[in-house]
Amino acid sequence: MRAEIDCAGATDVGRVRQVNQDQYLIAELNKSMLVQACSLPMDQQSRLFGSAQGHLLLVADGMGGHAAGERASLLAVDYMIERLLNSVHWFFRLKEDIENDFLDDLQNLLQEAHRRIVNDGAIHIENRGMGTTLTMAYAIWPRLYVVHAGDSRCYLIRNRKTECLTRDHTLARQLVETGGMRPEDEADSRWSNVLWNVLGGHGEGDITVEVRRADLQLDDTILLCSDGLYRYFGEQELADIVTDTTDASAACCELIRLANERGGEDNVTVVIGRFVNASRKPFTQIETTVPFSDLLDAESLNPADEDTQPDGIAQDRI
């Protein structure tokens, strides 16, 4: 049975920060044809689109002093858009026998975005050390692929139960996993805001890119968010709010409202995708922001290749 997606995204600066360093992206991927000349009754230069082949949901949470974190997350998302537009073939030939190649492509995509941010920081010294998390979910029904670095999260909500599909790349989580900290102490630990794995940052060499695969069912919901949102919610409450709201847009608005009401200490970003029966017409809302070309000049979006990378192992969120 075919599924449609009801998706929406929202971001808010919160009640404490002066700059919003979060970014999000919702995209529908499909085949297209640019008609240059034709004997049929249609305009020249018409672009024809096929049915949607896949859906992309993405959240990036930048970090760094002043506007450096905003720049890092912008560079990461801009690079993802550039690669998606020029490497669409892997989205339309997804078969069992080439799935491993597809997963390798996803990991390489984040590695390349990481190097782009590091190189930009080497050129613009005032932004040296800037970094960003990046959590991306790609759905090609009925498969879901999640690629991740940092501490933004992707949740799968099914039958009012929530499963986190990502692992926080923080020093606090490492301590819990190695037995050096009790799980109940993780949230309030001073190490919970220190990331050992981000795109850019002070990392040298490659980053660790996690990939997760899941099988989707009708009425599943995917929720991606920055830590400015999930710190205020338990997993059951997230499931209840998403399930009880009328559509994805309403759920995004309610979650951001509650996060700000409960403190709003950081930027708050959430993206939600609901998979519904194709026979039911979904409410679909995709919010837009200022074009990336208006925020970064052409030279900064295409920095010269540099081999120099800053040293260090951990990035503290500022």
Image: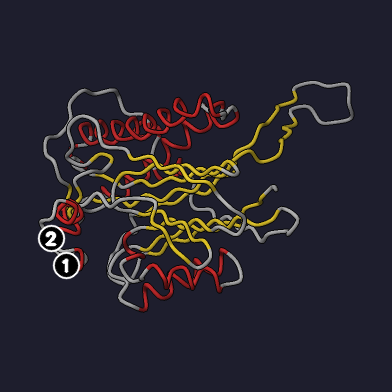
Q: Residue at x 56, y 26 (%)?
A: 89
Tell me where residue 126 sits by quadrant: top left
Image quarter in which the C terminus is found:
bottom left
Is disc 2 surrounded by few (<14), some (14 to 19) or many (20+) residues within 10 Å?
some
Question: Where is 317 relative to 106, above or below?
Answer: below
What residue sits right under mark 1 in the picture?
A: 185
Q: Which label number is shown at residue 21?
A: none
Q: Residue at x 20, y 54 (%)?
A: 173
Q: Position of residue 98 (x, y in %)?
A: 51, 24
Tell me where residue 118 sits by quadrant: top left
Q: Are marks 2 and 1 in contact (CB under 8 Å)?
A: yes
Q: Position of residue 134 (x, y in %)?
A: 35, 46
| Distance (Cα) linking label 2 and label 1 | 7 Å
Helix, strand or loop at disc 1? helix
Q: Residue at x 54, y 56 (%)?
A: 273
Helix, strand or loop at disc 2? loop
Nearest the viewer among 317 and 178 is 178
What residue sits right under mark 2 in the picture?
A: 181
Q: Please, what is the three-letter code of the amino acid marked with disc 1?
A: Asp
Q: Position of residue 240 (x, y in %)?
A: 48, 73
